[in-house]
Image: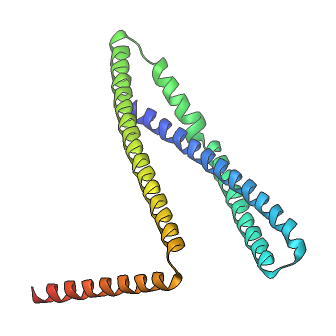
Amino acid sequence: MSHVLDRHARNKQMMMQFENELERLMNERDRLSSDLLDVQKRTSTSSNDLDNEEDLIKSNLTYVQESINNTQQALLQFDDSKDFNVGESHNVQKFINEIDNIDEAKYLLERLSTNSVDLLCKVANLENHLQERIALLKEAQQECLVQQQLLQHFIAQNNLEKITDLFESLSLSVSKSNCIRTSGSQKS
């Protein structure tokens, strides 16, 4: 029974993944269509850069549309599979209908409750992991923003020549550091 339920759950999950991917692709298509309209409005000035940008957006739009078609086709094929719609659902219902006594019903309820608790624990762990990743991402974004602001401030305060000198000195110190590490590891 648990294998049938697991298979049924995996099939449902696959359907949801196909649907989510389809929605993402459709949103991407809408965004690209909007970008294309913007570029076409600006193309009236007829610049080569805008023509290239328009061609690039059209290529991306074609690719996204092909991906939408492929995802829709995969979704329909998966949806049409007898294993998912008829076989699995029917097997679950058949299994439940074949319960003859209270002991079998108790066993089924115990298994279902155990599986439910296990799944809830997995979901809680995944949610915690996701929250940790989100916190790390926000921290990295904040750090990037601070570095960007510092760089902008530094650029505003110093001229380009000083910045070039700084980058050259940084690259020299990195090169020296690598040479020292390399020679140290060869001596060992």
How was the colour assigned to the protein in this rendering? rainbow
Give the percent coordinates (x, y) of residue 22: 66, 50
Q: In the image shown, does 23 or 111 lie closer to the viewer?
A: 23
Q: Residue furthest top?
A: 102
Determine whether, in the image, residue 150 is placed left or right of residue 23: left
Q: Is residue 147 above or below residue 164?
A: above
**Vertical relation: 11 (above or below) 100:** below
Q: Quadrant of residue 37?
A: bottom right
Q: Quadrant of the C terminus?
A: bottom left
Res 73 visible: no
Residue in view at x 58 percent, y 43 percent: 15
Residue at the image position 49 percent from the left and 77 percent from the top = 158
Whether 46 is drawn above or below 175: the answer is above
Q: Quadrant of the N terminus?
A: top left
Toward the right, the furthest residue is 44
**The furthest residue to the front:** 157
Is residue 148 visible in the rendered structure shown here?
A: yes
Q: Quadrant of residue 69?
A: bottom right
Instruction: Give the residue drawn at x 52%, y 73%.
Output: 155
